[in-house]
């Protein structure tokens, strides 16, 4: 008898300031991919964390990375994240400068 594995995807709300745009992000996709899937015109180029086009500031919420981002401790303390590498682990408020 085979056991059934149930996979549940947790959805989180992401609010993008200053435009006050909201979209849903699944924990299995990057924040950037969630934004693009929702039709949000989010700046991006390389999608691997090298060009910094998708860099924005996290004002609240929790994210995680599969690989540590190329950000200094100071940048991380200031809330900067690479949305092409980050996945949402809670609802987020992000600021796009």
Image: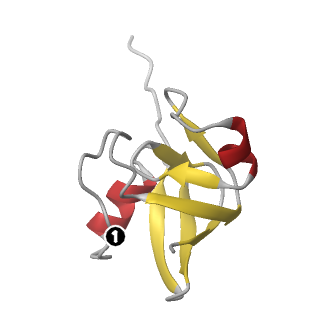
61 shown above or below 87? below
Look at the image and name its color scheme. Answer: secondary structure
90 shown above or below 97? above
Q: Residue furthest top?
A: 1
Q: At 56% from the left edge and 51% from the top edge, which residue is drawn?
A: 81
Q: Is residue 32 left or right of residue 78?
A: left
34 shown above or below 73? below
Q: What residue did someone put label 1 on?
A: 42
Q: At 66% from the left edge and 56% from the top edge, which residue is drawn?
A: 90
Q: Is residue 51 left or right of residue 5?
A: left
Q: At 70% from the left edge and 59% from the top edge, which residue is drawn?
A: 61
- Res. 12 image quadrant: bottom right
Badge 1: how crowded within 10 Å, few (<14), some, or many (20+)?
some
Give the x, y percent position of residue 89. Answer: 62, 49
Q: How many marks?
A: 1
Q: Is residue 18 left or right of residue 90?
A: left
Give the x, y percent position of residue 13. Answer: 56, 69
Quarter placement of the N terminus = top left
Q: Is residue 95 left or right of residue 30?
A: right
90 shown above or below 93? above
Give the x, y percent position of residue 88. Answer: 56, 52
| Residue in the foreground of this view, choosing between 74 and 59 | 74
Q: Residue furthest left?
A: 45
Give the x, y percent position of residue 80. Answer: 61, 54
| Residue in the foreground of this view, choosing between 41 and 73 | 73
For mark 1, give the secondary structure: loop
């Amino acid at each position: 008898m085979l056991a059934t594995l149930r996979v549940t995807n947790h959805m989180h709300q992401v609010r993008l300031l200053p435009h006050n745009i909201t979209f849903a992000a699944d924990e299995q996709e990057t924040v950037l991919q969630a934004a693009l899937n929702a039709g949000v015109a989010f700046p991006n180029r390389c999608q691997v964390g090298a060009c910094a086009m998708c860099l924005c500031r996290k004002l609240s919420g929790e994210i995680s990375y599969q690989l540590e981002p190329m950000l200094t401790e100071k940048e991380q303390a200031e809330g900067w994240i690479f949305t092409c590498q980050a996945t949402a682990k809670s609802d987020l408020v992000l600021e796009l400068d």
